[in-house]
Image: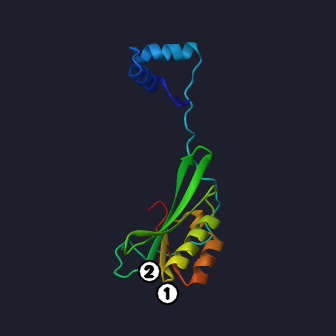
């Protein structure tokens, strides 16, 4: 058993092992022996500061382009691991709805999103003028990420704040 068992899980496990015991007895015994379940820490993104560049919403919720490599979208999510949080940046081609690139890091920073977009470009080799849509996260509004998009000939598009 790991240290995340509270009285409910402990009762279920003990019952599976053949011990007929109720939850309140388990709770009482856990208190007596000073057994406390570890709770996973909540995830909080590190404070990234003020947004540098907010792009207009060129996509305007039209998520069904008719041609490949014309409209890409990106986002970041987090995954809890035994060593802490892992951040995953994903790039999707909106026409095919397929993930074309991904990158992960222990920090949700601009290097993560830049690496993901460069991997996508190396894999797909799109023409210039691709619309890259994202949220207004600091990783996407940063000066260095916007510079990367400009170098690639991409057009940045962003949803309004608080809207996916």
Percent of width and height locating residue 46: 63, 53
User: In the figure, is residue 48 to the left or right of 102?
Assistant: right
Mark 1: few/some/many CA within 10 Å (<14, 14-19, 20+):
few
Residue 127 is labelled as: 1
Residue 121, above or below 78: below
The residue lying at 59 percent from left, 72 percent from top is 53
In contact (CB < 8 Å): disc 1 and disc 2? yes
- What kind of element bears circle 1? loop
Residue underneath mark 2: 69
Percent of width and height locating residue 58: 44, 77
The residue lying at 55 percent from left, 85 percent from top is 153
- What kind of element bears circle 2? loop
Q: Earlier in the sequence, mark 1 or mark 2?
A: 2
User: Between residues 85 and 122, which one lies in front from this camera angle?
Assistant: 122
Q: CA distance from mark 1 to mark 2?
A: 8 Å
Q: Is residue 158 visible?
A: no
């Amino acid at each position: 058993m790991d240290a995340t068992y509270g009285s409910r899980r402990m009762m279920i496990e003990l019952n599976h092992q053949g011990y007929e015991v109720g939850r309140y007895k388990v709770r009482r015994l856990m208190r007596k022996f000073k057994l406390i379940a570890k709770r996973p820490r909540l995830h909080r993104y590190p404070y990234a500061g003020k947004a540098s560049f907010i792009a207009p919403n060129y996509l305007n919720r039209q998520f069904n382009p008719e041609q490949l490599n014309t409209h890409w979208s990106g986002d970041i999510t987090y995954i809890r691991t035994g060593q802490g949080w892992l951040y995953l940046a994903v790039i999707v081609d909106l026409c095919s709805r397929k993930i074309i690139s991904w990158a992960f890091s222990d920090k949700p920073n601009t290097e993560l999103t830049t690496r993901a977009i460069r991997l996508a470009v190396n894999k797909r080799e799109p023409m210039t003028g691709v619309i890259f849509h994202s949220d207004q996260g600091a990783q996407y509004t940063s000066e260095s990420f916007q510079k990367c998009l400009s170098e690639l000939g991409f057009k940045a598009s962003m949803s309004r704040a608080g809207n996916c």
